[in-house]
Image (cartoon, rainbow, N blue to C red):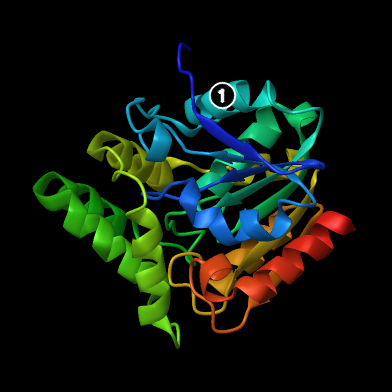
C-alpha cells in the first residue's frame, strides 16, 4: 500500500507486538517494555497518523488498517507472535488474527470490545451519540477533545488524577496525532462490528480490563468472553480503561502468566 511504518523493536525472545489505543502512541507501553524486554522481542507499532508515523494517513476502515499493520509488522517476525492491543489497538489485533492467522499465536485484548458502540442487542457499550459528539468537537478543538477522552478513560478510578497525569505525560512525549487520524479512528470505533466473526478467532485470548472502565465495562467484557471460543477474562479491581498504567503490577502479572502458559 506504499506505507512504510516506523516500528520500535527491542529486547530478545519470542515476538510480542504491541498496539496502542485511539489518540495515543506506542509510548503508553513504556512500563511493559521496561519489564518484558529481557524476555520478549517487543515490536511497538505507532498506528498511521500517530506518534512516529504521524505523517502517514490512517486508513478509513479496520480491515485496511489491519492490513497495513500486518504487512509492515510481518517482515520483523520470526514466526507466530503474540499480539497485544489496547482498545482500538485490540480491534486491530483481532482483525489481523482473522485475516492473517499465521501471524498470530495468541491475543491479549486490553479494554477491547468486538463492537465498541451500542446497539439494541449490545447495550453494554458506548452510545453512538457520545462518539458522534467527539467527532463533531474534533472540528472545533481537537486538543480539548483528546483531553476529554483521556479524562473519560480514568473516570471512576480511586487515583484518577495520577493516572490521567501519566497518560498526558506519555502522550506529550511525541507529537499529537493528526486530526484526520483521530476522525478515522472514531469512525472505526463507531462502525466496526466483529461479533459475527468471533467464532473464527481460534487463538488463545486474554481479555483484560478494569472494574471501573466506563468505555469497555466489565459487563461488555463478559459479553465478549461469551463470544470468543478460547478466551480467558481478567477484570482488575479499581482500574479504568488503561489498567497497564493504573494497575501496572497486576496487569503485568496477568500478562506474564498468560504468555508463559
Position in image of residue 186 (x %, y %): 34, 45
Q: Specify the farthest residue to the top.
A: 2
Name the one closer to the observer, 179 or 190.
179
Position in image of residue 94 (x %, y %): 64, 41
Instruction: Answer with the quarter of the image where residue 181 lies.
Output: top left
Name the one closer to the observer, 131 or 174.
174
Q: Specify the farthest residue to the right.
A: 261
Name the one closer to the observer, 188 or 18.
18
Is residue 78 something that shows in the picture?
yes
Q: Quadrant of the C terminus?
A: bottom right
Task: Write the residue at 54% across / 77% down.
Answer: 239
Residue position marked by numbered label 1 in the rendering:
67
Is residue 112 something that shows in the picture?
no
The answer to whether residue 167 is above or below residue 18 is below
Instruction: Answer with the quarter of the image where residue 58 lies.
Output: top left
Left or right relative to 251: residue 3 = left
Left or right relative to 88: residue 256 = right
Position in image of residue 206 (x %, y %): 73, 58
Task: Write the residue at 59% across / 49% down.
Answer: 85
The answer to whether residue 143 is above or below residue 233 is above
Amino acid at each position: 500500500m506504499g506505507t512504510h511504518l516506523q516500528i520500535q523493536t527491542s529486547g530478545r525472545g519470542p515476538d510480542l507486538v504491541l498496539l496502542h489505543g485511539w489518540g495515543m502512541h506506542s509510548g503508553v507501553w513504556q512500563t511493559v517494555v521496561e519489564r518484558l524486554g529481557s524476555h520478549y522481542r517487543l515490536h511497538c507499532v505507532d498506528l498511521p497518523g500517530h506518534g512516529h508515523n504521524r505523517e502517514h494517513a490512517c486508513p478509513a476502515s479496520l480491515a485496511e488498517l489491519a492490513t497495513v499493520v500486518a504487512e509492515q509488522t510481518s517482515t520483523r517476525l520470526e514466526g507466530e507472535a503474540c499480539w497485544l492491543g489496547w482498545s482500538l489497538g485490540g480491534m486491530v489485533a483481532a482483525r489481523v488474527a482473522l485475516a492473517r492467522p499465521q501471524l498470530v499465536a495468541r491475543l491479549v485484548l486490553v479494554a477491547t470490545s468486538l463492537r465498541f458502540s451500542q446497539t439494541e442487542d449490545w447495550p453494554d457499550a458506548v452510545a453512538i451519540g457520545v462518539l458522534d459528539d467527539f467527532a463533531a468537537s474534533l472540528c472545533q478543538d481537537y486538543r480539548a477533545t483528546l483531553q476529554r477522552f483521556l479524562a473519560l478513560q480514568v473516570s471512576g478510578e480511586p487515583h484518577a488524577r495520577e493516572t490521567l497525569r501519566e497518560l498526558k505525560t506519555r502522550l506529550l512525549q511525541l507529537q499529537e496525532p493528526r486530526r484526520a487520524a483521530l476522525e478515522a479512528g472514531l469512525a472505526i470505533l463507531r462502525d466496526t462490528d466483529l461479533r459475527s466473526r468471533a467464532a473464527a478467532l481460534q487463538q488463545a485470548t486474554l481479555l483484560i480490563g478494569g472494574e471501573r472502565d466506563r468505555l469497555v465495562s466489565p459487563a461488555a467484557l463478559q459479553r465478549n468472553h461469551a463470544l470468543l471460543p478460547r478466551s480467558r477474562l481478567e477484570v482488575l479491581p479499581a482500574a479504568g480503561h488503561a489498567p497497564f498504567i493504573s494497575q501496572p503490577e497486576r496487569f503485568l502479572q496477568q500478562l506474564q502468566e498468560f504468555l508463559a502458559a
